[in-house]
Amino acid sequence: MDSISANESLSDGQTIVSMKKLFVLGFFSPGASSRRYVGIWHNNLGNRTVVWVGNRNDPLLNASGVLMFDSNGNLVVAQGGRSFTVAYGKGAKDMKATILDSGNLVLSSMANPSRYTWQSFDSPTDTWLPEMNIGLRTTNRSLISWRSNDDPAMGDYTLGMDPAAYAYSQLDGCSLWYGDLMNLQDGYDVDGAGTLCLRLAPSELESGRSSGHKLVWMAGVIPFFALLFFCSLSFILWRRRHQRKGKEKIHAHHSLMTLDTDSAIKLWESEEAGSHFVLFSFSQLANSTNNFSEQNKLGEGGFGPVYKGNLQNGQDIAVKRLATNSGQGLVEFKNEVLLIAKLQHVNLVRLLGCCIQGEEKILIYEYMPNKSLDFFLFEKSRRIVLDWAKRIQIIEGIAHGLLYLHKHSRLKIIHRDLKASNILLDIDMNPKISDFGMARIFGSKETQANTNRVVGTYGYMAPEYAMEGIFSFKSDVFSFGVLLLEIISGTRNAGSHRRGNSLNLLGHAWELWKEGRWSDLVDQSTRDAYPEHRVLRCVHVGLMCVQEQAADRPTMNDVISMLTSESIIIPDPKQPAFLSIVLPTEMDADDGSSLSLNGITITELDGR
C-alpha cells in the first residue's frame, strides 16, 4: 500500500511503501533517542537513512502516535488528545496521502489525484533528492540540518538559494530560438544593436510574382515595427529602473517600519513566508481562545495581550493581539510579519501566521509550554528547575540565535530588545528568541546606525544606544551580557544588590570580580552543583559583553568561541558601563519589574 485516504490512519509500527518499494513512510526514533517522529526513509539501504521528517520540532514522547486526516483535510500526527499538522490540505475533504518512488509525499483529492495540494518536496528537511527543486519559485525551499544525530529539530546550518542575482547580456554571437515564446525584453540593450530573424519552413514561403511586392511591403513595415518595438522596450526598461530605484530608497532605511501593512497579506498570498505561514480569520482565533478570555491569557506586553489558543486540529498556539490604540504596535506588527516569517533557526520562535481583519491585527506563534525565562529565573521557588546544565544550554542557545541574526540569516538583523521576558522556553527548556517588533535590518556593509527615537528595555540597553541613539550588533552583545549575568546570578540587573548602596547587578559583579570573589555572584539555589570552570568562564564573558565602549565588546561569534572552547584566552575586562541604578522616580528598584521604553526622543540643540 502506498497511500492512506481520509477515512484511514497509520499507527506507529505501520508503514506505507512507494509503488516500486523505494521509499517508506512511517514512525521512527533517530539514533539513541526514544522520541518518535513521522518520516520518510530509503527502503533498500542497510541502515535506515531518513530523508524527510514531518514533525521535526514536535516529537512524540512514546509510540502511541497516529498519522491521520482531520476534519479540515489536513494531515496530522495525533497523540493523547493533541495533534500536530504535518501537511495542509487547504480545506478539501476527500484527501489522500501518497508516497511516490521519488521520495515525495503528496496530498491530492480523490477526484483529481494528479493535482497536488501539498508535497513534501516543498517543505524539505535536510536531504536533497532527485527531482526536488531548491529555490524561491513558490515557496522558500531550503535544507536545514538536524540539531544532532539523535534530534532532527532544525539545526544551525541552512542550504538554500540566495535571491540576490544579476542579469547580464552577451551580444556577440547568435542565439537560436527553437522553443516556446521568449521574453524579448530580456537580454537586449537599448543602446546597442541586434537583429531578430524569423526562420520559416520552405512550404510556408510563397513563390512567384508576389515575392517582389512582399519584399517592398516588408521593407516599409519592418522598420516601423522595429522602431515601435525598441521604443516600447526603452520605456519598459526605464520604468523598471525607476521602480528599482524606488525600492532601493526604501531598502536604504534598512527597516521594515516604512512598509505598508498590506504587505502582510501580499506576503501570505505570494507564499514568501514559507509553506507553513497561514492567514487566519478572526473568528478562528476567537474560537481557539474562548473569545480571548482571561482564563486563556498568558500575559501582556507593551503592545497588547497574549493568549493561549487551541485550533480545531488540536494544535496549541500563542495568539498576540495588537492593542487597537497602539500606534507603535502597528510598527511592531509590520516588523514581525515581514521579518520573522523569513527566519528559520532552532533558537528563534516560529511565526505560524497572522490575522488582518478591520482594526484587528494579530500574530500567531508556536506555543511555548514553559513560558518565558523570567518566569523561572526571577522567582525563587521556580528557578530551582534551572539546574546548571539547563542554564548553560540556555546561554549557548541564545548566543547561537543571536549569531544567526547577526551573521548567518539572509538578512543582517539587530534585535534591540533582548531580555529575559523575550526568551521563550520549549518543552525541553530550549531557548527561543522572540518579539522582533523593534528589530532593524542592516545592509551588508553597514556596521552601525543612529536613531532619534530610542526603544528597548531599561537595564538591557547599551550606553551608546541609551544616551546617543547609536546602535549596532554590539548593542545586542551588551544586552546578551546583562542576560548572561542574570542567568548566572538568578537576579535582575535593575535592582539594588547591596543594602544602602546603589550598585546594580553589573556594578555588583564588577566589584566581586576585582576582589576575586566572583563565586559570590552565583545563584545560591544551585551553588552546590555548579561546574566552577564553566561558570567562571560565563561570568568572564558576561563582563566582556557589558564593556562601556562598543569596540571592547566581542562579537557573538567570539562569544560562542569563548563559551565553548577552553583554549580561547579571554582578555581581562575593563570597568563595565552603568554600574549604578538610575530609576525613574515612579519606579521602585525592588518591585522586580522592567521598564520598556517604546519611544524616547533624543533632541540635539545647536547654537545659532
Image (tube, rainbow, N blue to C red):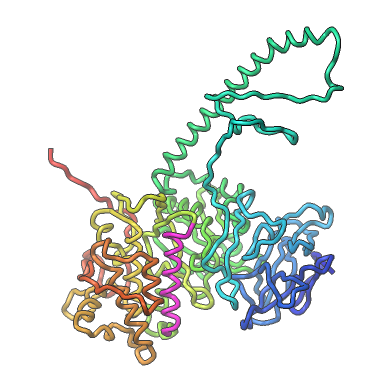
Q: Residue furthest left?
A: 608
Residue 396, position in %: x, y? 43, 74
Residue 419, position in %: x, y? 37, 67
Question: What predominant SS class does the magenta segment belong to?
Answer: helix
Quadrant location of residue 403?
A: bottom left
Toward the viewer: 139 or 51?
A: 51
- Residue under the image location 30 percent in, 76 percent down: 540
- Image position of 5 (left or right of 363): right
Task: Give the quadrant of the C terminus.
Answer: top left
Quadrant location of residue 209?
A: top right
Toward the viewer: 193 or 271?
A: 193
Q: Residue furthest front?
A: 173
Decide whether residue 393 is among the magenta residues.
yes
- Residue under the image location 41 percent in, 76 percent down: 564
Residue 589, position in %: x, y? 25, 72
> Does the rendering let one see residue 483?
yes
Decide whether residue 267 is among the magenta residues.
no
- Image position of 170 (left or right of 585): right
- Residue under the image location 20 percent in, 74 percent down: 503
- Residue under the image location 55 percent in, 37 percent down: 168
Count of residue discs = 0
> Does the rendering let one see residue 278?
no
- The range drawn in magenta is 387-409
Toward the viewer: 195 or 424?
A: 195
Q: Is residue 424 above or below residue 29?
A: above
Task: Give the quadrant of the N terminus.
Answer: bottom right
